[in-house]
Image (tube, helix red, strand yellow):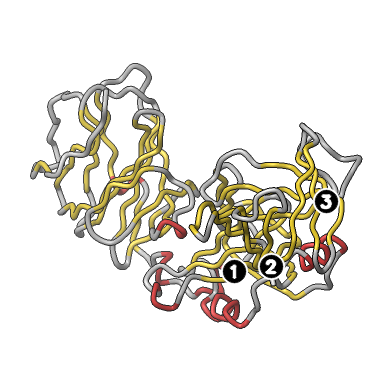
Amino acid sequence: MKRRLARWALAIGLLGFVSPAWAELELCNDTEVSQQVAVGYIQDGDWVSEGWWQLQPDSCIAAVLGALESRVYYFRSQSDGWVFRHDRVSFCTREGVFTISGNSNCASRGYQASYFAKIVTDRNATHFSQRLSQRSTRGRGREQMPIEAEAQPGVWGLPYRGAVIFQGCSPLSQASNPYCIFIGNGRKFTVSGDVRTPSALFESLRQIDVGTPVFIQGDWVGRFSSSVELVLRDVQLRSASDEDRLLSRLQGSWYSVSDPGDQFTVKGSGRQNRYNSTLTSMEYLSVMPYCGEFDTEGPYLFAWDSQGGTGLCYVIREVSDIELVLTYLPRGAELRYRRLE
């Protein structure tokens, strides 16, 4: 059954009140202040987040209507001066009322990633009530804490350190939802410019050239396919590896010898494809000593669509100032390209 959020709250007194056992997931504000609330749940096989609704004290909202088909749901409440104890489960949110499908790649889709708390309902229950006070207490909320207090390993997720290529940041005109991207080992790492990453560190990324090899350290928050959400803690320039130098030689524009209309341009770890001057797919590239089950013929070029999907493996046979020769795996087809003037 398709789920949806009710756009209304039941103004009921909580003390001494027993609500009817309607089939729904209910959020009840038993704090003394107004709270913003949101919920996350599975709908038709995909995660969905919905909110924000202003929930007054001593009021409830029917967050998910109908018989509860899952035992696990997620919610978030927030109010100035209150601390919300989350479970480090990330959903996409934005200001105002929203309904968002998917809980990954939040920054690249123009949203903010927020942490939610888990709700485990009673087995076979058709109705469940969650009180906000079980997760919210008075104090300095996480959003008001100094950024430096959050820049410690493991605060937001699994600590991570890796060698990657800097791929650039969102335009300054998109300052409301800023993000930066790194590419490495067949993955895209997205860092949001929110309170979790120190603002000075985030702004320093705009001084780095696209294609620069760096080490990054941070917390691995979540992953969807080949995309990782990362809270950045540190970034350092590093010396180029053999794979980095090979990627550097791929920079620029190329055309297919067998079909000159088939062209692409490599900038950093990004490959913009086009056909007869019409832009087609945008891909990310990683040069690696392995690719999937292949690890004996390398070096390999791994290419995957920027919107997700299956990646492709190639053996890099030759790359010079004028010619690029790849072997597409597993079929072994040879692909020849020439550099555009």
* Residue 279 point in image, percent of width and height: 50, 58
Q: CA distance from mark 3 to mark 2?
A: 19 Å
**Callout 2: SS:** loop
- Decide: few, some or many residues near mark 1? Use Cα within 10 Å; few <14, some 14-19, many ≥20: many
Q: Which residue is mark 2?
A: 340
Indicate the amino acid at tag 1: Ala
Q: Which residue is mark 1?
A: 151
Of badges 1 and 2, nearer the viewer stands 2
- Left or right of residue 327, residue 18 in this image: left
Q: Are marks 1 and 2 in contact (CB under 8 Å)?
A: no
Q: Which residue is mark 3?
A: 316
Judge by depth and name the residue closer to the eye, 327 or 220: 327
Residue at the image point whose x is 14% and y is 48% from the top: 58
Residue at the image point whose x is 80% and y is 73% from the top: 238
Indicate the amino acid at tag 2: Leu
Q: Quadrant of the C terminus?
A: bottom right
Q: Are marks 3 and 1 in contact (CB under 8 Å)?
A: no
- Decide: few, some or many residues near mark 2? Use Cα within 10 Å; few <14, some 14-19, many ≥20: few
Q: CA distance from mark 1 to mark 2?
A: 45 Å
Quadrant in which residue 144 is drawn: bottom left
Q: Is residue 75 above or below residue 212?
A: above
Q: Is residue 244 above or below residue 158?
A: below
Q: CA distance from mark 3 to mark 1?
A: 40 Å
- Left or right of residue 197, residue 328 in this image: right
**Callout 3: SS:** strand
